[in-house]
Amino acid sequence: MKKEVRTFCFDEELQIEAYRFEKILHPFPNHFHDHYVVGFIREGKRKMSCGNKEYELEPGDITLFNPGQNHACLPISNLTMNYYGLNISPLVMEKLVEEITGTAYLPSFTQPLVSDTELHCHIYHINEMIMEGSEEFEKEELLLCLISLLIEKYSQPFSEEETECLDEIESACRFIEENYAAHMTLDDICKAAALSKSTLLRAFTRTKGITPYRYLETIRINRAKELLEQGVSPIDTAIQTGFSDQSHFNRFFRLFIGVTPGVYRDIFEKRG
């Protein structure tokens, strides 16, 4: 079996990241990102869960994830996957939406899996141009066309939904986000949210689609990515993000991202 290959490339002009996963067998556990993810399956099959639904991904299928939207992606038998994606920060997305609509807001994808030939072509060509280091303005033009299509067909403005213990869960999230580098217990989170353990676990999972501990893990990994992108060593990154030791950090980082912290940092050092 061919070795798994992961390629990342950040476009300074567009301020978005393109990446490719090739011959991937690695399972991605339930997690979320702090950015938008737009991508498609080029080859292979996968089983994906998002929210309370399960999907089987096939070549050509497009995945659309909002920031904070939990999802998992698991292999089917021993089938590998090739996947091309784009990561877009909320700040960049808001600017793109304002450029297109005249109003600055964050769109919310209404479904995590779609099939759309035009959308597929835009994602593929943007990914290809970023990977090739193209400086042609066609790249920006394609990105604006992509976002226009997403706004028109697959999104709506983010809205606050009525959810059980919403304020308390947001308090728990803030506590985790502000203290992720420190050791914390479930009691600490319950105290911050003013909820019992059973109520916290039930309401948190229902609201966020993920457990409090997995939320903490994801926050730590996302912050670790930022530090590694800035050139911070894996050892210092592990310390600054609250991992108990280097091996623990390496294991979880590879589980979530698919590469080791050292390899991830090297990708951005080469980019500079």
Image: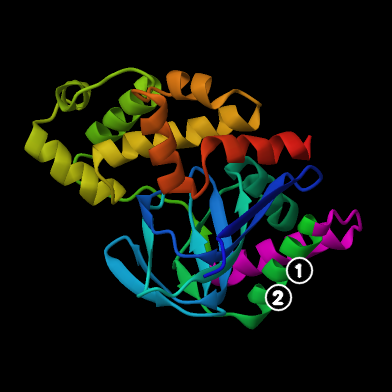
- Image coordinates of residue 132 in percent, x first then y, are 83, 58
Camera-side residue of 66 and 27: 27
Bounds of the magenta segment: 132-154
Q: Dot 2, how many residues are within 10 Å of its Cα: few (below 14), some (14-19), or many (20+)? A: some
Residue drawn at x 38%, y 22% is 242
Q: Is residue 70 above or below residue 40?
A: above
Q: Find numbered disc 2 in the image and state the secondary structure of the residue it sits on.
A: helix
What residue is drawn where x is 59% and y is 30%? Answer: 228
* Colour scheme of the rendered structure: rainbow
Q: Which mark is residue 121?
A: 2
In the rendered image, residue 150 lying in the magenta stretch gets the answer yes
Looking at the image, residue 94 sits to the left or right of residue 65; the answer is right
Residue 116's place in the image compared with 90, above or below, is below
For this rendering, which residue is in front, 215 or 114?
215
Pinpoint residue 86: horizontal percent, then vertical percent: 63, 57
Q: What main secondary structure does the magenta stretch of the protein show?
A: helix
Do the numbered discs 2 and 1 sit on residues whose CB atoms are within 8 Å?
yes
Instruction: List the residue tagged with mark 1.
Output: 125
